[in-house]
Image: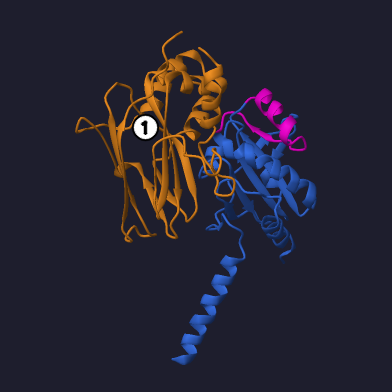
Amino acid sequence: MQIQWLLPWIAALLLTNSSPSAALPWADGETPPGPYVDNEQLFMLLRLHTPDQIGAFYEARGFPPAAIERIRQTCFITVHIDNKSNRILWLETSNWHITQNGKPVQRLGFAYWDSVWDEIGLPQANRSTFGWTQLPDVRDLQPAEPVGGNFVLPRNKQPYTIAANFHTGKDKRLGLAQVKFDQLYCAEDPPEQ
Amino acid sequence: MNRLLLVITLLGVAVTAAAAGLPPGIMLTDGRPAPALQLENLDGEPFDLANSRGHWLFVHFWASWCGPCRREMPTIQKMMETLQDKRLEIVMVNTAETEDEVFSFLGIVAPDVIPLMDTDGLVTEAWQPRGLPATFFVDPDGYIRYLALGGREWHTPPYLDFLHRLITSP
């Protein structure tokens, strides 16, 4: 594994949860490092990681080889969302529609990973760290509150579409914010030199 | 009718003023009791939150792999240097990292911080933070009164003023 080219990506992966005060891991005025939507209601950025990139991140956190192997087999997308509105924005990944060639695809979520970790006997500390690096299933994002974390899909060579719907308002009755990302390909490692 | 309107207006003004008194990203909570927190610190000394009544606590959960935590930690170090007041106890909890990881990170950015070590992450989960970093403010009776959303610049005037008001409140 060539570590040098991974360093900027490892630094970028240190995003996960972010804060409005000292928020974004790229400089003001620079283009965000991935597909993004920026409107009056929210900012949403996706970054797709190669197996080497995501493997290096968890390896550096002391994850055992069996866990790294399973992680590398999947498609990690780090999601960053900022609520730019003055009302509650509901992150509910059950309201996201992920498709590939028109067919629905399920997120490899907390239950999936729990079963994988049970299978390989992942230590509790690693489970905890892994959990905190995942995008939560539900969050009532307050005005100006960000959220971040990984959203994992099956790894293959077909493009994904993610249509994310967010109810707004405390009672979810103030309308729906909708964003859509097309042509999302799982990132691949560069060929060996 | 006019009197009722006046009362409603005054109440609205009072609530708005109270909300305006909080710096950005600080939320009032429902006042639930603080969960148990019994851990050893990096030096192996035991700590039990149940023994820390009678003053406010700043309970902070973090990990060195988390970008906002890394940016926030120096501001906590500066806040501790500025605020030194026994009426506010700073309780730093590292989530599920090893002593080596914690020591090598804090030695550079916040040498005065001696964190509690939640080595398996289960105490952090019991507190149910909205993510990392997370800061809870526990009142002198052991109830969570405020929550900080994400990382904050604790050494800046709005947050220092908030902390000062907290510890000087009756």
Supply the letter of whichever chain is blue: B
| Quarter of the picture holding the N terminus of chain B | bottom left
Instruction: Determine which quarter of the picture holds residue A176.
Output: bottom left
Residue B14 position within the rendered picture, expressed as x and y whole percent measured from the top left = 57, 75
Residue B112 located left or right of residue A185: right
> Alpha-carbon neighbours of circle 1 within 10 Å: few (<14), some, or many (≥20)?
some
Subunit under mark 1: A
Placement of A60 over or under A175, stated as above or below? above
Supply the letter of whichever chain is orange: A
Residue A33 position within the rendered picture, expressed as x and y whole percent measured from the top left = 46, 35
Q: Is residue A62 visible?
A: no
Nearer the observer, B33 or A170: A170
- Which residue occupies the extreme bottom position in the image? B2
- Which residue occupies the extreme left position in the image? A102
Nearer the observer, A73 or A81: A81
The count of marks equals: 1
Residue pointed to by mark 1: A109
| Quarter of the picture holding the C terminus of chain B | bottom right
Q: Is residue A131 visible?
A: yes
Question: In terms of secondary structure, where does tag 1 sit?
Answer: loop
Which residue corresponds to the image point at 58% horizontal and 66% vertical from the top-left? B20
Residue A187 position within the rendered picture, expressed as x and y whole percent measured from the top left = 38, 24
Residue A135 located left or right of residue B166: left
Write the start and end of the magenta stretch as one range: B98-121
- Which residue occupies the extreme top position in the image? A193
Placement of A27 over or under A54, stated as above or below? below
Nearer the observer, B161 or A66: B161
Which residue corresponds to the image point at 37% horizontal and 22% vertical from the top-left? A74
> Is residue A87 inside the magenta stretch?
no
Residue A44 located left or right of residue B139: left
> Is residue B119 inside the magenta stretch?
yes
